[in-house]
Image (cartoon, coloured by chain):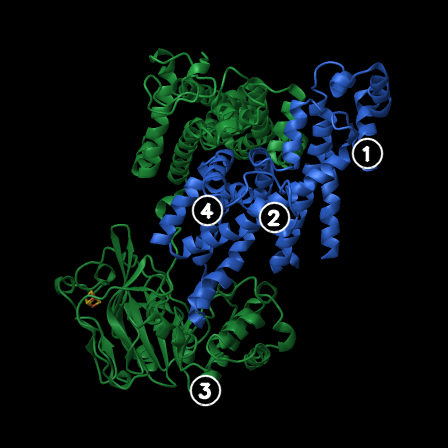
Amino acid sequence: MRAFFALLARNRLALVGLIVMGCVMILALITPILPLADPDVTDTSQRFQRPFTEGALLGTDHLGRDLLSRLLWGTRLSLAVGIAAAVIAATLGAAIGIVAGFYGGRTDNVIMRGVDMLMAFPYILLALAIVAALGPGLMNALIAVAAVNIPFFARNIRGVTVGIANKEFVDAARLSGMGDLRIILTEILPNVIPVIVIAMSTTVGWMILETAGLSFLGLGSQPPKADLGSMLGEARSALITNPHTSVVPGVMILIIVMAVNLLGDGVREALDPRLRSGALTRPMAATLVRRKGPVPEASDDALLALRGLETQFHVKSRIYRAVGGVDLQVRPGECLGLIGESGSGKSVTALSIMGLVASPPGVITGGAVHYKGRDLIGARYEDLRRLRGNEIAYIFQDPLATLHPLYSVGDQLAEAITCHHNVSKAEARARAVNLLKSVRIPNAEDRANSYPHELSGGMRQRVGIAMALANDPEVIIADEPTTALDVTVQAQILSLLDDLRRERGLAIVFITHDFGVVAQLCDRVAVMYAGRIVEEGPTDAILNAPAHPYAARLMACVPELGEGRRELAAIPGLPPAVNDLPDGCAFAPRCDKAQPACRTGEIALARSSDVRRVRCIDPEPIPEEAAG
Amino acid sequence: MAGYILKRLISAIPVLLGISIIVFVIMALIPGDPATAILGSYATPENVERLNRDLGLDKGMVQRYFIWLGNMLTGDFGRSFALNRPVIDEVLERFNATLVLAGTSFILCSLVGVAAGVVSASRQYGLADKAITFVVLLGISIPSFFLGMMMILIFAVNLRMFPVSGMWPIYGDRDLAALISHLTLPALALAVVATGVIARLARSAMLEVLRQDFIRTARAKGVHERSVIWRHALRAAMVSIIPVLGIQAGFVLSGAVYIEIVFQWPGVGRMLVDAILKRDILLVQGGVVFVAACYVMFNIAVDVAQTLLDPRIRS
Ligand code: SF4
């Protein structure tokens, strides 16, 4: 509860709401002892005095009654009625909800059917019908407003009760021979009360407004007693000549409802963990770039070259260094494997290339990605967009989540074409069907009309590949495209990719945690650990004789190289949290060969042969034939 | 699809029956002799006897309910003694006016609300987002009847841009231009609260969707951000926005009561309030059942729209 109030206090708007509401409540409470004129004494000689006149701070109404006094008394009445309605609705609603939730079965069914039917009414019609039957009057308006809000409480409380009624302590109470009433009062009610209070705090504003509304219509409080609604209703006939008589009560209702709403928002935010953690933030069109330090120059002839790429996640005050200075390059027609445990930063590296890291919280803080000599990091959005999918395309894991669920796959493929080429719809559609054929999807014409949920996992992944191929890109970045698939489908997809690479001269960056896949497809491989490349070189050389202790350990975990399905098995210890990287080698805490020198200063990715590089001060020796 | 619609229509029958029972029970709360209560000052002995016969008021509750239900099914909602015409005629006429008002408001609040929510979400924490969030807070806090009165004061009385009240000019043509000028203020006043609620929901629905993987896919394809937001994200967000539109339609219909009073719009809400004050019970009863039934039907339409939009439910 304390923490809850602390959270509430941190939300400044909610605090404003709380303070305003508190002031209004206090004013309403002390109204009887304030030196105010009698709110009901009429004096027609003093009618329609303007505000700020002598003796009437807010002026007078059509009967010469003091508006300030009537306002405060009216506020008192409105609050009292609104809160009373809320309490009644909450009590009865909770009682109904608890009975339905506790007994379940038939009782529950019948009650909830009734509740649903009450909720099928536009609420004010129901209130009007009740007032029509009982006759106008404040008490009847209160009953009507309470009654129409009962279903809301009943439904909410029932949900909570069902959850509690099945817990062990309730069973235990039953077994110990406690009566139902006692169980409800001692076991259920205490657990439900917080929910009731919260539901009340979010609806009391409505109820104040609704009772004011009924009074405004002339169906609530009757003269000479007036709540805010009937004050406004009475003032309506003088709206044009003496607007202040309307503005005074109207603004008061506005203030009250606004304060309650602010408070209610604060309460919800304090209670909803998702809102609290800021998880509901929207990733922007491209990853935020905030590079410090010099931008590396484009150096060699590589098609795509990453130079010292750094990507971080900024969450509140914590900084996660997901990618901490990665250098990689691919040449046309080459397949580069990027391998590592989950959390090693391989996916973030891949997504950084085209600015697809969700941001916030992602920020690219350094380095460069050169594509054909041009730096993509910090490129204008429009330039980046033209390259996306057109020259550098992605294939993602789990195509059920990565394909749009509400568009047919044909439409999604056609869109990939039309957003880069000015072709007719029919033309794009025809090309889409051809793409589906090229990834060996049978019945391509029919399949184009299917929605993602209608396809099998393997089919969906083929669609994902077809989408990547749509514009004949130069580079394909495949992020674990086969992980979600079974072994035979996986093999088919891999051989498909391999064929495409040979036919079209594609460069592929293949991200995986599976050495078997790397062995089958990749020319070169880079091993990532804690956001950095720890070893890089030709696939065969590294698979046969890993130089970095981490890579070596990974290999050792693989039972039989060259056969079957091998994945990175567990290595003792955990990869370091990337918001708390140790000095020196990140692998040191898990490394058998760790020595004091490993834990100080930067360890460079050094050449271990002509074509191999390793980031270790004491690498495993490389035999002659595995030097690459 | 046709099968689905039929199924939904059939499932509406118990709800409609439930509504009629609830209204019947509420009306049974009226203290004293029902015939006298219904007739009020028209309670001559002949009238009382005729009403007793027509409505079966001398019979038991259950029998009375079925007589009433049977009458309604044949379109006979009774007779308003205050207006001296059949209830159904009056209700239909008034409901038309309400439909014009509430329908316009509903379209307005759906379009503006969704658009505001989308803009707000796509500029999260930006200036536009903050401005919209503030206006929305103001919008959902201001009582519509007060807002309507202030609009009359400012736009009708001071600026003379629109007529003060009514649906048609007292003299002059009843053409579309006249209707629009009469409709603008009440439709706006009625739309404000619902617009705010829809904008809030649309914003959070969009934020939810924008974090999904398929949005990243769209971006990776090179889809322009405009299209990512308005085509990919909005389409997916609509799945959770549409049910709220259905709920808000109920609030617009409810709020119309206040707006009709403030702007003297000749709708069903004003009719009900007048009827309550005149104790014209049969008119209230008929009006409530009729409007509630229409609302149930509208919600079915919303459900159907929902299925049309989402192939996952469709198949
Ligand atoms: S640098 Fe030291 S701790 Fe790190 S892998 Fe090499 S030997 Fe092990």
x, y (%) of residue A474? 40, 82
Chain A colour as displayed: green
> What's the CA distance linking mark 3 and mark 1?
76 Å
Residue tagged 1: B76
**Of residues A526 and A545, the one drawn nearer to the viewer in this rendering:** A526
**Which residue is tagged 4?**
B200
Q: Residues within 10 Å of mark 4 (few under 14, many from 20)?
A: many
Mark 2 → mark 4, Cα distance in angstroms: 33 Å
Marked residue chain, label 4: B
Tell me residue A551's x, y (percent).
29, 70
Question: Residue B178 — which label?
Answer: 2
The correct choice, above or below, for A129 with respect to B4 in the image is above
Q: Quick one: which chain is blue? A: B
Q: Secondary structure at mark 3?
A: helix
Label 1 with label 2: CB-CB less than 8 Å: no
Asked if disc 3 and disc 1 are in contact, CB closer than 8 Å, the reply is no
The mark that comes first in sequence, 2 or 4, is 2
Q: Splitting the image into 4 quarters, where does residue A521 fall?
A: bottom left
Is label 1 or label 4 in front? 1
Q: Can marks 1 and 2 be said to lie on one chain?
A: yes
* Numbered disc 4: secondary structure: helix
- Classify mark 2: helix, strand or loop: helix
